[in-house]
Amino acid sequence: MPLERRNLRERLRASRRAMLADECWQAALSVAARVPDDLVYAEACHIAGYWACQGELDPRPLLERAWATNKQVYLPVIVNDPVGTLHFAPYRPDSPLRPNRFNIPEPAISPDEWLSPEQLDLVLVPLVAFDSTGTRLGMGGGFYDRSFAFLANPAYQGQRPYLLGLGYEFQKSPELLIREHWDVPLDAVVTEAAFYEFR
């Protein structure tokens, strides 16, 4: 039976927040080391990260690796066309930032420089939980699912960004999560202990 989402999100978010800063950083370094060199990462030019908050796995070691190999890095920006979706603004260590409505920093970059989700090669996706089929439980806002819904459309023939979830091993659910019709599954997840590829 699929695992009910009720209380799972809050329980795992509490576990993330309880981690010590050094423990989180060591996990982030381990995650970066586990991303295979021959994955989409090797050929990806446009890589989307995220600003880690509330104990999320920090993508900075992976972003630093991307900068070191002259890849373009982006952070999500909440937009309202379509409503409640994401575009992705260029991001460098010295980029000016401004808080969005959730107080999460976004690059203060002209919209003329943003990319749409379809233009990305690799997307590093935060998560609260995941299962053995690539089903992801997020924070509940639906931003990633709405933004990448085109990937679930059989008629879509364009570029297909590779969705790589980043998380801690304790976030792997031993039971299947309920996959709603709007949920966009992940291509893979990497934790400090393992790399899981689903497609």
Image (cartoon, rainbow, N blue to C red):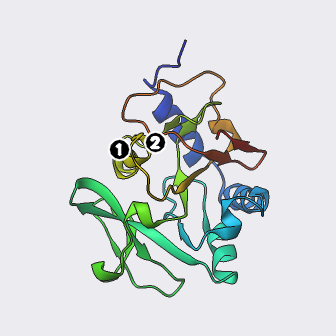
Give x and y (percent) for residue 12.
55, 36
For mark 1, does the 10 Å Cα neighbourhood hold few (<14), some (14 to 19), or many (20 or more) residues? some
Give x and y (percent) for residue 26: 75, 59
Image side of residue 147 versus residue 21, left or right? left
Numbered tag placed on residue 138 in the rendering: 2
**Mark 2 touches mark 1? (CB < 8 Å):** yes
Which of the image's four quarters has the N terminus? top right
Q: Secondary structure at mark 1?
A: loop
Q: How far from the left and from the top, in percent, is residue 192? A: 75, 50
Q: Residue at x 34, y 81 (%)?
A: 108
Q: Is residue 9 above or below residue 80?
A: above
Amino acid on which the number 1 mark rests in the picture? Gly
Residue situated in front as seen by the camera: 68 or 128: 68
Residue visible at 78% across and 61% down in the picture: 33
Q: Tell me if 81 is positioned left or right of 165 in this view.
A: left
Q: Residue furthest top?
A: 1
Q: Quadrant of residue 171?
A: top right
Kind of element beneath mark 2: loop
Q: Residues within 10 Å of mark 2 (few under 14, many from 20)?
A: some
Query: Which of 29/77 is in front?
Result: 77
Q: Residue at x 78, y 45 (%)?
A: 193
Q: Residue type at mark 2?
A: Gly
Q: Residue at x 67, y 56 (%)?
A: 24
The answer to whether 32 appears left or right of 153 in the picture is right
Q: In the figure, residue 153 lies in which quadrant?
A: top left
**Quadrant of the rendered image containing residue 59:** bottom right
The C terminus: image quadrant: top right
Q: Mark 1 — residue?
A: 142
Where residue 121 sits: x, y (%)?
A: 54, 64
Give the CA separation, mark 2 to mark 1: 8 Å
